[in-house]
């Protein structure tokens, strides 16, 4: 009797694990397609249950304002949870947010909320969009030229910004970004690129 109960419990657990894997795949596929409502529906319960991949994906959505209101405090919490669960991309994203000024050293909720708000005045035209990550500055220039040719109408009037970034493993990469932009133009560019399944991430002004 005990053996049959144990086997039944194992089968139920395996079924739950399989269902979670299917939900995660559905959520990540929705992210790739830019179907943010579906992604939120699939990923939020998994993130609450401690799935680090779901926490990472959901954290980036809140960091970038993809289908949700930008919420730096929530993004940081989710990304830190994902990092604690072994998701190295979450650690890299947190570091990226730190060096781009999205996270304040104090780490207080009020400070992070201020970082998420639109920046007025001189910083109004300091927004950028991130298009790719490449190994070197030379390859960043080549990639930007390629993207400018491919998406000339969308990226018209922008210039290459290529900040370097140290990964957690010590390697250095270069971000391919376009700017300077105001918030409206940055969001418009990313919306148009995502419509054609091209990668794009909004970078808010530093400081």
Image (cartoon, grey):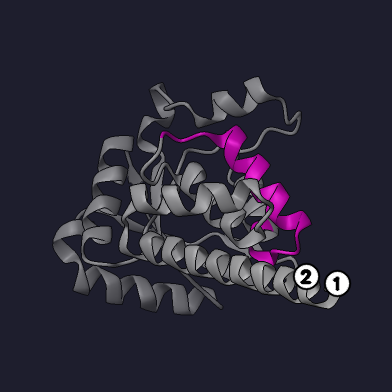
Q: Residue at x 36, y 52 (%)?
A: 38
As drawn, the label of residue 5 is 2
Q: Quadrant of residue 119?
A: top left
Kindly indicate whether the residue at mark 1 contacts the one at mark 2 (C-beta within 8 angstroms): yes
Looking at the image, residue 70 lies above or below residue 17: above
Quadrant containing the C terminus in the rendered view:
top right
- Disc 2 to disc 1, how far (Cα)? 5 Å
Q: Main secondary structure of the magenta part?
A: helix
73 w.r.t. 181: above or below: above
Question: Which residue is denoted by mark 1 in the rendering?
Answer: 2
x and y, in percent, of residue 148 in the image: 25, 68
Tell me where the magenta segment starts and ends, as one range: 69-90
Q: Is residue 44 above or below residue 113?
A: below
Residue 149 belongs to the span the image colors magenta: no
Image-based side of 5 in relation to 31, left or right: right
For residue 12, above or below residue 43: below
| Neighbourhood count class around disc 2 (C-alpha, 10 Å): few under 14, some 14–19, many 20 upward | few
């Amino acid at each position: 009797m005990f053996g049959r109960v144990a086997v039944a419990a194992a089968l139920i657990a395996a079924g739950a694990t399989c269902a979670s894997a299917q939900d995660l795949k559905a959520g990540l596929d929705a992210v790739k397609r830019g179907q943010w409502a579906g992604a939120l529906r699939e990923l939020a319960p998994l993130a609450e249950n401690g799935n680090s991949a779901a926490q990472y994906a959901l954290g980036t959505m809140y960091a970038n304002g993809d289908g949700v209101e930008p919420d730096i405090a929530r993004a940081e919490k989710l990304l830190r949870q994902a990092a604690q669960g072994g998701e190295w991309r979450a650690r890299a994203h947190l570091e990226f947010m730190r060096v781009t000024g999205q996270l304040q050293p104090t780490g207080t909720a009020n400070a992070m909320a201020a970082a998420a708000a639109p920046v007025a005045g001189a910083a109004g035209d300091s927004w950028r969009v991130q298009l790719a990550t490449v190994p070197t500055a030379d390859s960043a220039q080549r990639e930007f030229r390629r993207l400018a040719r491919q998406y000339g109408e969308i990226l018209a009037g922008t210039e290459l910004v290529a900040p370097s970034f140290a990964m957690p493993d010590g390697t250095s990469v270069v971000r391919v970004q376009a700017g300077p932009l105001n918030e409206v133009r940055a969001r418009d560019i990313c919306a148009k690129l995502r419509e054609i399944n091209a990668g794009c991430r909004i970078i808010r002004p530093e400081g």
